[in-house]
Image (cartoon, rainbow, N blue to C red):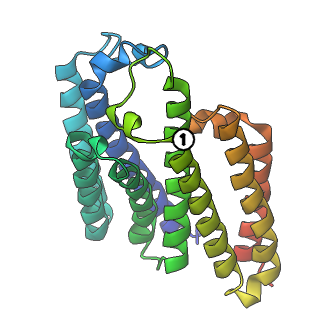
Amino acid sequence: MIDQPLVAAQVAGAFVVMCLLSSATYLVNDVRDREQDRLHPSKRLRPVAAGELSPRAALRSAAALALAGIVLATAITPGLGIVACCYLALTASYSLWLRRVVVLDILAIAAGFVLRAVAGGVATDIYLSRWFVIVTGCCAIFLVTAKRYAELRENTGSDVAARATLRRYSLGHLRLTLLTAATLAGVAYTGWAFTRPAHLLWYGLSIVPFLLWLARYATLIGAGAGQAPEELILRDRTLLALSATWSVLFLGGVYVGG
């Protein structure tokens, strides 16, 4: 548990590792997208697109960050080093190829989020149940699809340059994917909660804010938000309140029990 110093240190280490690797990936993508980003009203402010950071310096920084991430991951545990390499291989495949393939671009990004979660389990040697992986994967697909949906809505009929794959998606298909991912996440989370009879009160109650969070996010996406998920999650008071409520109930199940 995170109240144990060693486990807390391992979790913190895994967090730093994934931050280093993610930063390396973002720098590479910013270099590849710099010409397109310069035509976007907000992305043009990114350091590479704005000319504040040269492509060569960005790539050197990316290489240094990736190397530091792998070294730190391996120092924590060899298994985490393997996860780090898999993450870099996945993100490199996305940057070079998968980002141009419909559906696979969504799945690749979602898989990256799953690997981040898996990294925590590997670093602490804590078993991750299939329920955890399913819920994490479905929620990741939900968020990535929501971002694509928001991007497509904004770029429909707009002169702003958009990623090539957007032209091959339709709002209807993305809505269906959103509904499917949210439904599967809800069913999987509920199924997991009811397999924990000793903690059923806490985990059962946590189902409510979990489902309401998904519904609220979907509503905001339908209203035109969602291009920047991190901003939406941190600025919407309802999402923050639901997140806090879920956290209290979930941690109650972990530390208080039945």
**Direction from residue 89 to residue 182 in the image, left or right:** right
- Residue at the spot 55% in from the left edge and 77% down from the top edge: 131
Q: Nearer the viewer, residue 11 or 227?
A: 227
- Label 1 crowd (10 A; few <14 / some 14-19 / many >=20): some
- For badge 1, the amino acid type reads Leu
**Direction from residue 176 to residue 11 in the image, left or right:** left
In x, y percent, where is residue 250?
A: 72, 68
In x, y percent, where is residue 221?
A: 65, 39
Q: Quadrant of the C terminus?
A: bottom right
Q: Nearer the viewer, residue 191 or 128?
A: 191
- Residue at the spot 65% in from the left edge and 73% down from the top edge: 187
Quarter of the rendering containing residue 10: bottom left
Rendered view: 56 above or below 71: above
- Residue at the spot 56% in from the left edge and 61% down from the top edge: 181
Rendered view: 220 above or below 119: above
- Mark 1, residue position: 171
Q: Nearer the viewer, residue 161 or 108?
A: 161
